[in-house]
Image (tube, grey):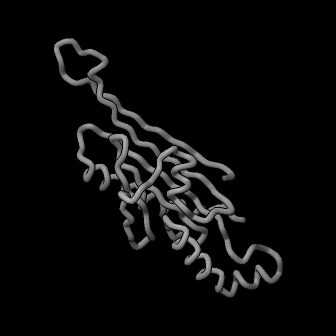
Amino acid sequence: MVSGRHYFYQRSELQQSKLQRPELQQKQGLEIEVRYVVNTDGNISQFMKEQKAIALDTTYAQIKTDLGTYSRFIGDHQVHLTSCIDSEGSSTVTTEQFFQNRYLYARKLDRLIAWSLGRNDLLDKRCLWIALSLSDPHQNSDQMAAALETLWHDQVMVWRSQFPQP
C-alpha cells in the first residue's frame, strides 16, 4: 500500500427521555476509506482481513453493476461495501476478476507499445481499494445498503477519472 485516506462522519442524537441520559445516545456513522495499493492481486477478502480486521466468509454478496463488481456484507451492526477500482476504472472484488481485467487491458496496443519501450509493466497491478460502512439505528440494513450503493457509485465515478499515474 502506498497511501490512503480515511474519513469518518458521525451524527449523534439523544433519544427523548425524561433524563436525557448520555447512555441513551444513538450514533450514526459513515466511514469512507480509500487506499492506493500497488502490486496487489485484487483480493478484497484478504485486504479486509489485513487492513480492517474483518474476515469475510461466504455470507457476503457480490453485486455486479455497469461499473463492475462490489462486495456487500453486514457485520458489527453496520453495512459494509468494498471493491477494488483498477487503473482502467473497473471495479472488482476477487483475484480472478482483477486478473481477468489485467489480461484484457494488457492486450491494448498503447499498453503493449509502452511496455515494449520499457515505460510500464505489461500487467498493471494497482488498484484503489474503497471501503464504505454505515451504521444508523433508524434504518434497516436494506435502506443502509441502498444509501451505500449510491455513495459507492459516486466514489467510483470520481476516482476512476483521478486514478494515479504509474
Q: Quadrant of residue 75?
A: top left
Residue located 34% across and 49% down the image: 74
Q: Quadrant of the C terminus?
A: bottom right
Q: Residue reaching furthest left?
A: 18
Residue nearest the viewer, comparing 71 with 111: 71
> Is 117 situated above or below 133?
below
Q: Position of residue 73 (x, y in %)?
A: 37, 54
Asked if residue 41 lies left or right of residue 8, the reply is right
Q: Position of residue 153 (x, y in %)?
A: 41, 61
Q: Residue reaching furthest top?
A: 19
> Is 82 situated above or below 23?
below
Q: Quadrant of residue 89?
A: bottom right
Asked if residue 121 lies left or right of residue 66, the reply is right
Count the numbered circles shown: 0
Q: Position of residue 100 (x, y in %)?
A: 55, 78
> Is 43 situated above or below 17?
below
Residue nearest the viewer, comparing 148 with 44: 44
Q: Residue reaching furthest front?
A: 57
Q: Quadrant of residue 38?
A: bottom right
Q: Residue reaching furthest right?
A: 117
Asked if residue 45 lies left or right of residue 146, the reply is right
Q: Position of residue 87 (x, y in %)?
A: 61, 68
Residue nearest the viewer, comparing 12 with 95: 95
Residue located 48% across and 63% down the image: 157
